[in-house]
């Protein structure tokens, strides 16, 4: 089926079967490969995008349901959250980096709704994102830093 | 820093590689030759690893694979430092698999150990040539000119020339042997925390991992593999014909049921125009499989067999026996004995295996997240039906690997399918494929038995280890653990015991086993560190005090079998030092609240020393770790921030396997399939982590990626014992 999508502010037409998850439309049809496949089951968060501003697992979103919804991917993050991109870079948060698009999109959604999150807020918002390399302590620190205040306790 | 692995069109990237590696250049260790003949005008290529153009842009070729350990950055730091390059004018080029680079196998935590000297020499030779070129131009002595930050300066006359302006002339000079190296105090990148060369791209979603590499007209394949090793396709009941988007359905030969090495597992390849179409059609197939001897394999039975094996004598480790263990046991005294068990584990790198192959009658071009593109190349060539010189293998970024991606089976699948459908093909493993068809980390059992004195020191110590050897993957007849597996924390126990014996037993598994981050050190460090803690607690002694009493005050371990390379012997003083430091770092002697325990473990592996203390308690019936303290001595380090990050990551990796890691097999098939039944540690469970690095002190560089993992599980077990009085001898620790 033909679907009109609004991705990173651009309206694009794709012609795919309606049950195709947004993840594969982004990756295979729109060349937006920043969004990653990690599990296909909603467990890992590697595929996290923003749907109408909320962090959402794109592997669980059939494209047929997305007509007219606003989708933002990691490729737009630099424009919307340059501080996150900078703190992630300057703190060497990423190890292999494969989970980090998803981590950053979850972090961005958190900061959009809660500009000064506590460690507990961070843990709650980021719990859907697995990092097999184990960068969690740096993720906490980088979110605090991007939010413009120091860690409240455990992370440094 | 520009970064040339990312987001290049394939055309550009191929051109780039021709530009660099299509030219014969000198190896850093080769004798003096004229560089002129091999160098195109205007460029300076004094080494395989280093080239410079007339604009002064330096290209460092990295021949190891990046999987999060920061190797693209660290190797570049080494060259750029000795070259005295301006970091912002250095680019990184990823090497293809090619014997000309020497060993490219990115495993065993040895990329720095193996390449530190030769890459320093490469940078230093180039710096000397640039100084010589400037000295010639100014007609002064080379000793009177100095290199500094991409320039050569003649202080006496205040003249200076940029490296780029000197490139052509430097390229005409002979490559010097034994160019002077900097002193440690003169290093500007080595030993400094440098931001990873790929960090900025990754934070923008621009890093190119295996699945992100695309070529025109590429199809995507999903392969359904037989649940048991060695089974093949008998029939497909419902082969679809005219599904839109379907390219082909291909039957692939089964791997050998024993000693499969890196052979693809076989199965049914569904090739389609996009990933979702391939997935959907693959999942709908009704496939009947042929049998294999592995079809009856059950992990519960293996675990029983491993327990039985360590309950009786195994094969003594040659040269490990000291004194007379049996006589001491017969004489009686305070005796302790315990059996430890660990399950199979799956690597589960965040990026499932994936590969892109473009096979034609003349060439095969392969891009994939491979840990060893060089050893994969002849296998890929054979699969493609071509000679290796017709094959290009380029590693992408690896989205985690942990040992999984040193086996190129998934790349061979892509090659075969591309050859069949005569189009470029990407093979995408699903997470379910990854968990079910891994080279599993071996399940194991250890038995320890000791007689201890009043201070908890063993007068006799018998240890046994049983596990399926990795060598079973290489040879259909192999059974016994190899010496190199036993040297991972078993036969090289660093404690002084007068009467000692070590025995091992191997059991062939009905599955592929392989090396996972720190390999046999995981279970050997677990059992030895928990047993040592049991000795201490049996006499009411502090675990760290007790451990220091077991380790000789100084000197080096003489391990049975092959001696360690000079400079890499286990040094008791360094082992004691990391223990002393972690005691301080963790405030070990400060009492913790009721119900909170500290656990300590120490391990030497991959030539490094790591001591770890965890602070843990039980929280709603589940173990919970609040703080981790790690001290690492890896000799000379290149990027301290990377070393710290690797220890932080090792704590998380170690806790995942300690709390959750458990792969079971029934009727030849892995039971688990995805992160819901093979969970990973999540952010709320990650402890605050403090890491200290022992200063370099001019020592040989040692491993960093793996050695942080082994102490984690025993430190957790010991912490929970301190917190609750319950001993955990089996992993994972769930309650
Ligand atoms: S890929 Fe979507 S949650 Fe894992
Ligand atoms: S950085 Fe590798 S999985 Fe998170």
Image (tube, coloured by chain):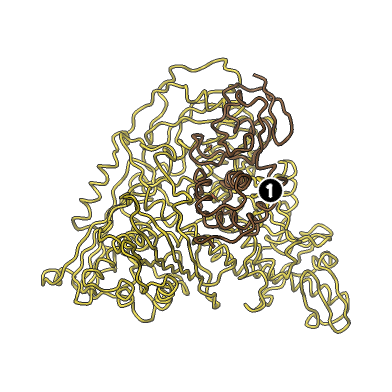
Chain colours: A brown, B yellow
**Quadrant hosting residue B2:** bottom right
x then y, percent, for residue B445: 27, 53
Residue B548 point in image, percent of width and height = 33, 76
- Does the image show residue B230? yes
Residue closer to the observer: B442 or B389: B442
Count every numbered label the image shows and give the total: 1
Q: Residue at x 63, y 28 (%)?
A: B422
Q: Quadrant of residue B436?
A: top left
Chain letter for mark 1: A
Residue A112 versus residue B340 in the image, above or below: above
Q: Specify whether A68 is left or right of B259.
A: right
Residue identifier under label 1: A81
For numbered disc 1, what is the local secondary structure? loop
Q: Point out the residue furthest to the left here.
A: B331
Image coords of residue B379 (percent x, y): 53, 43
Which image quarter holds the N terminus of chain B? bottom right
Q: Name the side, left or right, on which B211 lies relative to B504.
A: right
């Amino acid at each position: 089926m033909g679907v009109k999508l609004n991705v990173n502010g651009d309206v694009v037409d794709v012609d795919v079967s309606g049950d195709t998850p947004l993840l594969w439309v982004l990756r295979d049809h729109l060349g937006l490969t920043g969004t990653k496949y990690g599990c296909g089951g909603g467990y890992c968060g590697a595929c996290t995008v923003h749907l109408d501003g909320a962090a959402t697992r794109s592997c669980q979103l059939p494209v047929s349901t997305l007509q007219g919804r606003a989708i933002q991917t990691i490729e737009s993050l630099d424009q919307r959250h340059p501080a996150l991109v900078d703190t992630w870079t300057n703190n060497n948060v990423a190890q292999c980096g494969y989970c980090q698009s998803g981590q950053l999109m979850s972090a961005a959604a958190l900061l959009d709704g809660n500009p000064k999150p506590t460690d507990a807020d961070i843990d709650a918002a980021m719990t859907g994102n697995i990092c097999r390399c184990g960068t969690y302590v740096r993720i906490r620190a980088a979110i605090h830093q991007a939010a413009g205040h120091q860690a409240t306790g455990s992370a440094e | 820093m520009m970064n040339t692995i990312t987001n290049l069109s394939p055309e550009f990237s191929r051109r780039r590689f021709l530009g660099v590696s299509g030219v014969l250049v000198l190896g850093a260790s080769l004798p003096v030759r004229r560089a002129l003949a091999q160098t195109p005008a205007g460029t300076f290529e004094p080494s395989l690893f280093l080239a410079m153009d007339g604009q002064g842009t330096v290209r460092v070729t990295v021949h190891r694979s990046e999987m999060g350990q920061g190797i693209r950055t660290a190797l570049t730091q080494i060259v750029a430092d000795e070259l005295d390059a301006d970091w912002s004018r250095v680019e990184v080029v990823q090497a293809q698999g090619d014997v000309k680079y020497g060993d490219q196998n990115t495993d065993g935590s040895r990329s720095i150990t193996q390449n530190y000297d030769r890459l320093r020499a490469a940078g230093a030779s180039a710096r000397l040539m640039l100084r010589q070129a400037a000295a010639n131009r100014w007609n002064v002595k080379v000793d009177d000119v100095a290199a500094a930050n991409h320039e050569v300066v003649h202080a006496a006359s205040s003249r200076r020339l940029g490296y780029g302006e000197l490139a052509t002339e430097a390229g005409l000079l002979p490559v010097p042997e034994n160019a002077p190296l900097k002193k440690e105090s003169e290093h500007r990148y080595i030993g400094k925390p440098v931001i990873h060369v790929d960090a900025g791209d990754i934070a923008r979603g621009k890093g190119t991992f295996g699945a992100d590499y695309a070529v025109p007209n590429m199809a995507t394949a999903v392969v359904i593999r037989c649940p048991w090793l060695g089974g093949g396709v008998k029939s497909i009941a419902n082969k679809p014909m005219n599904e839109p988007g379907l390219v082909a359905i291909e039957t692939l030969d089964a791997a050998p049921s024993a000693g499969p090495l890196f052979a693809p597992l076989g199965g049914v390849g569904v090739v389609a125009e996009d990933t979702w179409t391939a997935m959907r059609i693959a999942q709908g197939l009704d496939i009947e499989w042929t049998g294999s001897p592995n079809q009856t394999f059950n992990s519960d039975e293996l675990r029983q067999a491993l327990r039985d094996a360590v309950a009786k004598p195994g094969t003594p480790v040659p040269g490990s026996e000291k004194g007379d263990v049996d006589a001491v046991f017969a004489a009686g005294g305070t005796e302790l004995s315990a059996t430890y068990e660990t399950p199979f584990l799956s690597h589960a790198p965040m990026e499932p295996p994936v590969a892109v192959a473009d096979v034609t009658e003349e060439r095969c071009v392969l891009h994939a997240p491979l840990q060893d593109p060089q050893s994969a190349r002849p296998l890929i060539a054979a699969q493609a039906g071509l000679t290796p010189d017709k094959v290009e293998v380029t590693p992408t970024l690896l989205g985690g690997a942990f040992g999984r991606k040193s086996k190129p089976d998934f790349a061979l699948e892509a090659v075969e399918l591309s050859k069949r459908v005569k189009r470029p093909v990407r093979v995408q493993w699903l997470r379910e494929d990854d968990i079910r068809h891994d080279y599993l980390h071996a399940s194991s059992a250890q038995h320890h038995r000791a007689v201890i004195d009043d201070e908890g020191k063993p007068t006799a110590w018998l240890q046994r280890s049983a596990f399926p050897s990795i060598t079973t993957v290489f040879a259909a007849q192999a059974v016994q653990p190899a010496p190199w597996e036993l040297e991972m924390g078993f036969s090289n126990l660093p404690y002084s015991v007068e009467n000692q014996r070590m025995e091992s037993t191997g059991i062939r598994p009905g599955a592929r086993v392989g090396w996972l981050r720190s390999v046999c050190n995981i279970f050997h460090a677990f059992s030895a560190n928990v047993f040592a803690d049991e000795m201490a607690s049996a006499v009411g002694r502090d675990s760290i005090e007790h451990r220091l009493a077991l380790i000789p005050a100084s000197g080096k371990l003489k391990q049975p079998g092959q001696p360690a390379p000079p400079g890499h012997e286990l040094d008791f003083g360094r082992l004691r030092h990391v223990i002393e430091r972690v005691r301080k770092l963790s405030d070990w002697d400060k009492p913790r609240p009721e119900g909170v325990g500290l656990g300590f473990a120490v391990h030497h592996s991959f030539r490094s020393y790591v001591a770890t203390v965890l602070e843990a308690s039980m929280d709603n019936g589940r173990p919970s770790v609040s703080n981790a303290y790690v001290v690492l001595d890896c000799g000379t380090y290149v990027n301290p921030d990377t070393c710290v990050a690797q220890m932080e990551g090792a704590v998380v990796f170690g806790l995942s396997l300690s709390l959750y890691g458990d792969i079971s097999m029934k009727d030849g098939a892995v039971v688990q399939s995805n992160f819901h039944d093979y969970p990973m540690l999540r952010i709320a469970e990650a402890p605050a982590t403090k890491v200290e690095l022992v200063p370099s002190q001019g020592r040989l560089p040692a491993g960093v990626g793996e050695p942080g993992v082994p102490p984690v599980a025993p430190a957790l077990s010991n912490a929970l014992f301190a917190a609750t009085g319950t001993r955990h001898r089996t992993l994972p620790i769930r309650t």
